Image: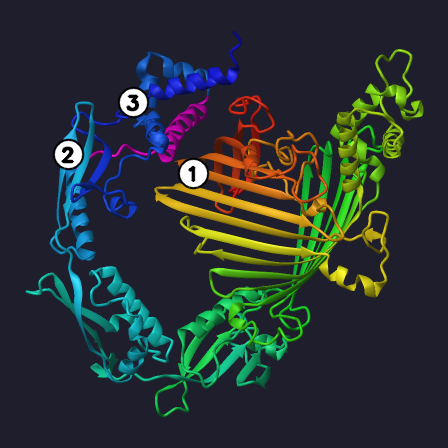
């Protein structure tokens, strides 16, 4: 019986783990805490919010195994002393070592041993030794938590189960009793604050009949403070708000008294209270080129515009509106924290300034004590930014390649805070592909250039008004274009792109992206190289020709050398293309199976070698509750609708376009694409605490050709497999349907994908994950007829492929390096035994990626 190395290694690894002793570093009179249980009114409490209150938590044990504890236990507790004892354990050992090594080398060996053990301690996790003192504090903290949530009479206790194996479990019991409910609410609010509070009282978080929660009171104080400071109370602070709760003889009810105190002012050793005043902005000064070097210089340029005074230490380089648009603080408006925050946000988004500074000063001309002057200090980023990337690579396309990618960014290019971004890339490589006739070492190349212009406003008639898309929504317009061309790479594509894009943010959770124009032109300069690139298609075509050689023109085949055996192959491209042409002309009498085979190959060749002209419009709706890159408990939803070719179809009669041989219309000699495409993408993260996260993703996409097209362009179709998709298959190797991925680049116009990951920390920056991916692609409502490829109904959901596996992720703070090993768990390409047939390391796919897959 043949036993693989991987199985032996896995067996030895499991054997090693099973031999680890979790209590190795636990003293004789100590106990390792292995479990906490919280019983609330005799029912087990599963909320992470409650369990995380305990001062002591068992050692982290993803999948039930405390890996970090065992790593810590591998370390020597006293490595320096151990090394000294080892040196002196045998007579003459120290002297013999000093004869072989110098004193410095022996000292280096000592440092290495000490460093190794300290590294194990740092990467691992020390055993959590049960402390009854901390257990008592945890019980008290539980009681305080329930008290803060309205159970004022809650009682907590604990029991400890100490085992003979140095392990212990703690059970906490909570009796909540009857909760307290908010009843009456009285208020003592002075002068101006009282009228402001009346406007927001209906939105109060403290309501009669609601269970008491301390958090509600804290949040209500924050809410009141934010509203007051947004309505002109410049000096108002959260500490001025106090709540008193009366529960004496109330029958489990809470009578609440809200007090807003007057502002306390200290002046000349005297403390007195002053009433609140609504402050108004009497002037706004904007300094366009403030910096540490300029702060003591006199200004040399100034402009008065729309209620603003714009200053420059040097000549002002910006248009007036470009400076005032991102400032939300207006002369004559009441003071507002919100206006200041919006100004910070918008100025920072422009990308032409560093983070601004905003301060307020009392207007010296004011006698009422209510006028404020706002000063906005803008610090410009350098006008020009240069970049240069260089890389060396190897891939399935090139044996060796070098890429250089220079870039240039120009800020405030037209004086309106615009950003012009220009980049280029050039790759030269070496390939041993026999189909390449170029004998030079560097025989393949690809060059390209991109340019984009971003403007901080909507640039379109009638849409530039703040009434349509207000500047609070941070609107941007981007014009972009790109060009790339290849030599001796595949079909030698030329790709020209152009976009006219609007982007805005209705609120902090929503993003809207409207591509008014999305243009792409793809031209294949070397379509005759198709069968050299797509060898699977050629092999199948060649097999049909060889099986029917008696009917095929012998000029289509290669001439065999005298020492060669077997049937000759079709010539590329003349023989293969001539064979297909004769087939189309009805020259052959093949079986139905061979007819279908040749027909499929011909349709795929025509589709992948044809030039594409795509003129599309799309809209994307994105909603995310994520509050930052470290937020691991959120949902994200993205919907995109794309339409192509409709505008050209409307103007086709006016352009006098004529039908081609396919029944479609050409523009500039290319049949333009027409289709409707939709995508839905949903992601959900659950933070389970202690770096344990569950992440789920669901994706669905459908592109329907119509009118001038009977299929979707390759560039806009869907594929399955790869590091960010179904990880048990390489990219483009899965599907369509149950076909088995027989082509080099398998794609289709319908896709379903579902993924789930359980992520956890191993130790230090090294993380891991268990994952399951489900999905496939199909053809539907296009010109593909093979039933293996086509989605015919819900019964074809049995063709959803399943992969599962494990991943390692190394966190470098600024990005994550990821290795995921995917196993084919359910393969729809098999007629029978679809489950676990290829579930082994030999058929596994090793995916390397940057950052998380979703």
Residue 365 appears anywhere in the view: yes
Residue under label 3, please give it: 21
Give the x, y percent position of residue 708.
76, 52
Instruction: Give the alpha-carbon distance from disc 1 to disc 2, as whole Å.
Output: 31 Å
User: Mark 1: which secondary structure?
Assistant: strand
Give the x, y percent position of residue 736.
64, 35
Sooner in the amino-acid sequence: mark 2 or mark 3: 3
The crowding category of the residue bearing disc 2, from other C-alpha atoms within 10 Å (few below 14, some 14 to 19, many at least 20), is some
Residue 124 in magenta?
A: yes
Q: Residue at x 84, y 44 (%)?
A: 525
Q: Is residue 801 above or below residue 293?
A: above
Residue under label 2, please give it: 160
Question: Residue 759 has which mark?
Answer: 1
Residue 489 appears anywhere in the view: no
Determine contact: label 2, label 3, CB under 8 Å: no
- Residue stretch in magenta: 102-131
Q: Is residue 417 left or right of residue 398?
A: left
Between marks 1 and 3 in the image, the one whose residue lies nearer the viewer: 1
User: Mark 2: which secondary structure?
Assistant: strand
Q: Is residue 258 above or below residue 516?
A: below
User: Mark 3: which secondary structure?
Assistant: loop
């Amino acid at each position: 019986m043949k036993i693989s190395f991987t199985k032996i290694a896995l067996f030895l690894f499991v054997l090693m783990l099973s031999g680890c002793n979790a209590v190795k570093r636990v003293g004789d009179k100590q106990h390792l805490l292995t479990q906490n249980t919280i019983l609330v009114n005799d029912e087990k409490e599963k909320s992470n919010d409650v369990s995380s209150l305990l001062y002591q938590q068992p050692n982290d044990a993803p999948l039930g195994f405390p890996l970090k504890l065992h790593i810590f236990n591998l370390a020597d507790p006293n490595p320096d002393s151990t090394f000294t004892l080892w040196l002196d354990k045998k007579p003459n050992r120290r002297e013999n070592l000093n004869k072989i090594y110098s004193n410095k080398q022996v000292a280096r060996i000592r440092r290495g041993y000490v460093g190794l053990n300290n590294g194990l301690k740092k990467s691992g996790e020390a055993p959590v030794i049960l402390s009854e003192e901390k257990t008592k504090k945890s019980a008290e903290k539980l009681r305080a938590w329930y008290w803060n949530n309205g159970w004022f009479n809650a009682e907590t206790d604990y029991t400890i189960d100490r085992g003979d194996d140095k392990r212990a479990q703690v059970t906490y019991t909570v009796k909540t009793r009857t909760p307290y409910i908010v009843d009456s609410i009285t208020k003592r609010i002075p002068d101006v604050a009282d009228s402001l509070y009346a406007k927001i009282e209906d939105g109060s978080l403290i309501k009669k009949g609601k269970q008491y929660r301390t958090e509600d009171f804290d949040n209500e104080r924050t809410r009141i403070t934010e509203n007051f400071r947004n309505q002109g109370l410049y000096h108002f602070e959260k500490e001025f708000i106090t709540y008193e709760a009366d529960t004496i003889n109330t029958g489990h009810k809470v009578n609440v008294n809200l007090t807003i105190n007057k502002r306390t002012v200290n002046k000349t050793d005297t403390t007195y209270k002053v009433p609140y005043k609504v402050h108004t902005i009497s002037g706004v000064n904007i300094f366009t080129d403030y910096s540490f070097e300029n702060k003591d210089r006199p200004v040399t340029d100034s402009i008065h515009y729309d209620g603003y005074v714009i200053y420059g230490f040097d000549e002002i380089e910006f248009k007036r509106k470009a400076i005032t648009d991102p400032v939300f603080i207006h002369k004559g408006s009441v003071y507002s924290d919100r206006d200041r925050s919006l100004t910070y946000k918008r100025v920072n988004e422009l990308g032409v300034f560093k983070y601004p500074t905003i301060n307020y000063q009392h207007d010296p001309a004011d006698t009422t004590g209510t006028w404020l002057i706002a000063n906005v200090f803008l610090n410009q980023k350098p006008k020009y930014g240069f970049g240069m990337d260089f890389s060396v690579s190897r891939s399935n396309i090139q044996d060796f390649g070098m890429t250089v990618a220079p870039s240039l960014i120009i800020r405030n290019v037209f004086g309106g805070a615009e950003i012009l971004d220009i980049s280029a890339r050039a790759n030269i490589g070496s390939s041993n592909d026999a189909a390449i006739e170029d004998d030079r070492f560097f025989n393949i190349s690809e060059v390209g250039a991109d340019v984009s212009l971003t403007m901080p406003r909507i640039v379109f008639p009638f849409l530039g008004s703040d009434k349509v898309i207000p500047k609070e929504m941070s609107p941007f317009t981007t014009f972009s274009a790109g060009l790339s061309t290849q030599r001796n790479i595949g079909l030698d594509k030329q790709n020209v792109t152009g976009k006219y894009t609007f982007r805005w943010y209705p609120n902090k959770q929503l993003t809207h992206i409207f591509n008014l124009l999305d243009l792409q032109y793809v031209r294949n300069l070397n379509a005759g190289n198709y069968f050299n690139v797509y060898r699977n298609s050629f092999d199948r075509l060649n097999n049909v020709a060889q099986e029917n050689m008696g009917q095929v023109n012998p000029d289509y085949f290669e001439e065999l050398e005298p020492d060669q055996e077997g049937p000759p192959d079709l010539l590329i491209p003349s023989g293969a293309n001539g064979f297909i042409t004769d087939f189309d002309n009805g020259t052959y009498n093949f079986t139905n199976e061979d007819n279908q085979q040749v027909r499929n190959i011909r349709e795929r060749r025509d589709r992948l070698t044809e030039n594409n002209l795509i003129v599309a419009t799309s809209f994307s709706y994105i909603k995310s509750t994520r509050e930052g890159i470290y937020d691991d408990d959120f949902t994200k939803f993205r919907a995109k609708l794309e339409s192509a070719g409709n505008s050209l179809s409307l103007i086709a009669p006016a352009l006098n376009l004529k039908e081609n041989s396919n029944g479609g219309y050409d523009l500039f000699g290319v049949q333009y694409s027409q289709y409707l495409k939709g995508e839905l993408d949903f992601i959900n993260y659950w933070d389970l605490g202690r770096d344990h996260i569950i992440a789920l993703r669901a994706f669905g996409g459908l592109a329907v050709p119509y009118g001038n097209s009977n299929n979707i362009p390759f560039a806009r179709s869907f594929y399955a497999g790869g590091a960010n998709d179904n990880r048990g298959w390489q990219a483009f190797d899965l599907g369509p349907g149950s076909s088995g991925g027989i082509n080099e680049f398998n794609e289709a116009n319908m896709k379903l994908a579902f993924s789930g990951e359980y992520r956890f920390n191993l130790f230090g920056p090294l993380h891991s994950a268990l994952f399951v991916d489900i999905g496939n692609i199909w053809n539907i409502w296009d010109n593909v007829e093979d039933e293996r490829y086509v989605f015919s109904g819900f019964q074809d959901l049995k063709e959803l492929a399943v992969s599962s596996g494990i991943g390692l992720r190394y966190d470098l703070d600024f990005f994550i390096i990821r290795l995921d090993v995917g196993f084919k768990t359910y393969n729809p390409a098999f007629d029978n035994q679809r489950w676990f047939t290829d579930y082994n390391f030999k058929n596994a796919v090793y995916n390397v990626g940057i950052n998380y897959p979703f």
